C-alpha cells in the first residue's frame, strides 16, 4: 500500500477503484450527507462514474487532491480528506476538506488529519494558503477548521443547485497562510514548524 501521510492514529493513502464500496457506504449515510445534499445517498453509479474519477485525479505538481483515511492500527476505512489545489496547475492555494463516517466523529480524527495535511502542504508541497468552506450552520466542521489553525475570512451566499436545510444561512470561508502558520508555531507541537 502506498502511504501519502501518517499521523499518530491515521494513514492517508491514494484512492483506488477498489474503494467504491466504502465510498458508497460513506455517502449512503444521511447524517454524513446532511450538509452536502440534505441527506440523500449517493448511488453506486454516481460513485463509480463521478465520485471515484474525481478522487483518483492526479495533479501536475505530483500529488492527488483527495486521500482515503484509514485507522492506523486496524486499517478501517474512516472516510477521506481533501487537500486539493484551487488552480489545477499550482499548489499555492489549496482547499481543505474531509468526510468521515459517523463512527469517526467526535474522536479528533478530522483535526488530526487536517493539521497533518496543512503541515505537509506548507513544509513539502509548496502551499502558501489553505482555505476551507462550509455551511454557516455546520458547527462541527467550523470547529475542526478553527482547531486546525484556520481563521474566519468571510460569510457568503453560495449558489446552491437546490436549497437544503440550513443553506438559507449561507456559507463561511476560513483560511491560513504559510506566514501565519509559521508565526503561530508552538514549541514541540507536532503539527507546527519549530520556532526559529
Image (cartoon, helix red, strand yellow):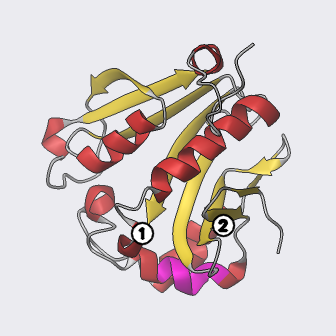
Image position of 15 with respect to 111: above or below: below
Near-viewer residue (2 or 172): 2
Image position of 80 with respect to 184: above or below: below
Q: Residue 129 appears at what percent x and percent y? A: 61, 24
Which residue is located at x 56 percent, y 18 percent? Answer: 184
In the visual, does 196 lie left or right of 183?
A: right
Which labelled disc corresponds to residue 104? 1
In the visual, does 63 lie left or right of 171?
A: right
Q: Quadrant of the N terminus?
A: bottom right
Q: Residue 157 appears at what percent x and percent y? A: 25, 31
Q: Residue 59 appears at what percent x and percent y? A: 78, 47
Image position of 44 with respect to 166: above or below: below
Residue named by callout 2: 53
Quarter of the image for residue 174 reads: top left
* Lower sequence index among marks 2 and 1: 2
Which residue is located at x 45 percent, y 61 percent? Answer: 99
Q: Specify whether residue 50 is in view.
A: yes
Q: Residue 186 appears at what percent x and percent y? A: 58, 24
Label 2, label 1: how many angstroms apart (C-alpha)? 25 Å
Q: Specify whether residue 125 is in view.
A: no
Q: Quadrant of the C terminus?
A: top right
Magenta-tinted stretch: 19-24
Helix, strand, or loop for circle 2? helix
Image position of 139 with respect to 146: above or below: below
Q: Residues within 10 Å of mark 1 (few under 14, many from 20)?
A: some
Helix, strand, or loop for circle 1? helix
Q: Residues within 10 Å of mark 2 (few under 14, many from 20)?
A: some
Residue at the extreme front of the image, as rendered: 188
Examine the structure image and report whether residue 76 is included in the region drawn in magenta.
no
Amino acid at each position: 500500500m502506498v502511504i501519502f501521510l501518517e499521523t499518530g492514529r491515521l494513514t492517508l493513502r491514494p484512492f483506488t477503484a477498489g474503494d467504491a464500496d466504502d465510498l458508497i457506504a460513506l455517502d449512503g449515510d444521511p447524517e454524513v450527507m446532511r450538509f452536502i445534499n440534505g441527506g440523500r445517498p449517493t448511488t453506486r453509479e454516481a460513485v463509480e462514474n463521478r465520485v471515484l474519477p474525481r478522487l483518483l485525479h492526479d495533479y501536475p505538481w505530483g500529488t492527488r487532491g483527495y486521500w482515503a483515511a484509514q485507522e492506523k492500527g486496524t486499517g478501517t476505512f474512516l472516510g477521506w480528506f481533501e487537500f486539493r489545489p484551487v488552480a489545477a496547475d499550482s499548489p499555492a492555494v489549496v482547499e481543505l476538506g474531509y468526510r468521515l463516517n459517523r463512527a469517526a466523529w467526535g474522536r479528533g480524527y478530522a483535526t488530526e488529519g487536517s493539521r497533518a495535511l496543512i503541515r505537509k502542504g506548507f513544509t513539502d508541497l509548496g502551499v502558501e494558503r489553505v482555505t476551507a468552506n462550509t455551511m454557516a450552520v455546520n458547527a462541527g466542521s467550523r470547529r475542526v477548521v478553527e482547531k486546525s489553525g484556520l481563521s474566519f475570512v468571510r460569510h457568503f451566499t453560495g449558489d446552491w443547485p437546490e436549497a437544503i436545510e440550513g443553506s438559507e444561512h449561507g456559507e463561511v470561508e476560513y483560511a491560513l497562510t504559510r506566514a501565519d502558520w509559521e508565526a503561530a508555531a508552538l514549541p514541540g507541537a507536532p503539527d507546527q514548524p519549530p520556532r526559529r
